[in-house]
Amino acid sequence: MAVNVNTVYRTVLLIINKEQRGYLTPDEFNRTAAQVQLEIFNEYFDDLNQQLRVPGNDSEYSDRIKNLEQKISIFQESGNCIYTGSRFDLPAMVSPYEFYKLGTVIYNDEKEVQYVQPNELLELNLSPITRPSTYWPIYTYKNFQIEVYPKTITNNISCTYIRKPLNPVWNFTSSPPGYQYIYDSDNSQDFELHPMEQTNLITRILLYSGIVIKDPQIVQIAASQVQTENINSKS
């Protein structure tokens, strides 16, 4: 489930050409596309926070909270945390550059570890009733590291997290005599956003290129034309 980067780029070029606004090189497109995708991704969380404050609806397909959660779920991952002597690092498969937000920390695959602020930890340790234990573990989080209490816990910690989307890349080959750009699907990277974001992506990339599209149907018609051309070229 993704948005085809070739469809987006060719649609953008088609509209730019019709508007007589010059040309958008692959490098310019890739940089703009990465920025636009990250903007839309970041907005999911602001929108979700706003929607959680208002009543939802009972419709299976129009509930805004469910729709946003579905879009975010594409980027949800999980893995085992790595003990480094006093703290746990994030799962090895995610780098700090790719990491976006920590989700749930889990002990022994069954118990949720509760997050606390460092000042709360001091207060909790004052009483044997609230002091952390293997039955009620807690953690603090800083600089991509999880510190779990009690300190006797040195393994069996896992977590869920949300990663950032991979940067879209429209890659190409070219050869003489014309050196035209030929789309290279094997070395390209599609947008990772939900397919329903295709029109939004194209509209925002065009906005960065100085073109304001007031009617989304213009984008949809252009994208449909490009997709038809893609199908015909393969038949």
Image (spheres, grey):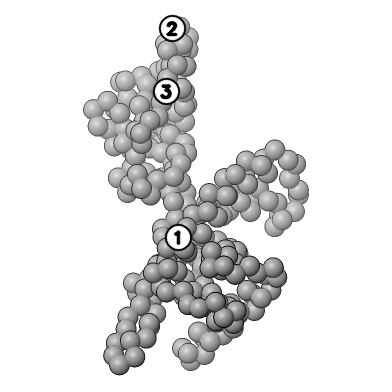
- Residue 174 position in % (x across, y down): 32, 83
Q: Nearer the viewer, mark 3 or mark 2?
A: 2
Asked if the residue under mark 2 is in contact with the one under mark 3, i.e. CB atoms within 8 Å, the reply is no
Q: Residue furthest top?
A: 127
Q: Which residue is mark 1?
A: 34
Q: Residue at x 45, y 69 (%)?
A: 29
Q: Residue at x 45, y 16 (%)?
A: 119
Of labels 3 and 2, earlier in sequence is 2
Residue 144 vs residue 176, the one in the foreground: 176
> Vertically, is 183 above or below 35?
below
- Residue 66 position in % (x across, y down): 64, 50
Q: Residues within 10 Å of mark 1 (few under 14, many from 20)?
A: some
Give the Cα distance between marks 1 and 2: 49 Å
Residue 217 vs residue 55, the one in the foreground: 217
> Vertically, is 223 above or below 120?
below
- Residue 102 position in % (x across, y down): 44, 39
Give residue 142's quadrant in the image. Answer: top left
Of labels 1 and 3, earlier in sequence is 1
Q: Nearer the viewer, mark 1 or mark 3?
A: 1
Q: Residue at x 75, y 53 (%)?
A: 59
Helix, strand, or loop for circle 3?
loop
Q: Which residue is mark 2?
A: 126
* Marker disc for residue 137: 3
Residue 131 can be seen, yes or no: no
Horizontal side of residue 109 vs 7, given as left or right? left
* Marker disc for residue 157: none
Q: Mark 2 belongs to which amino acid?
A: Leu
- Residue 215 position in % (x across, y down): 70, 70
Give the Cα distance between marks 1 and 3: 39 Å
Residue 66 vs residue 184, the one in the foreground: 184
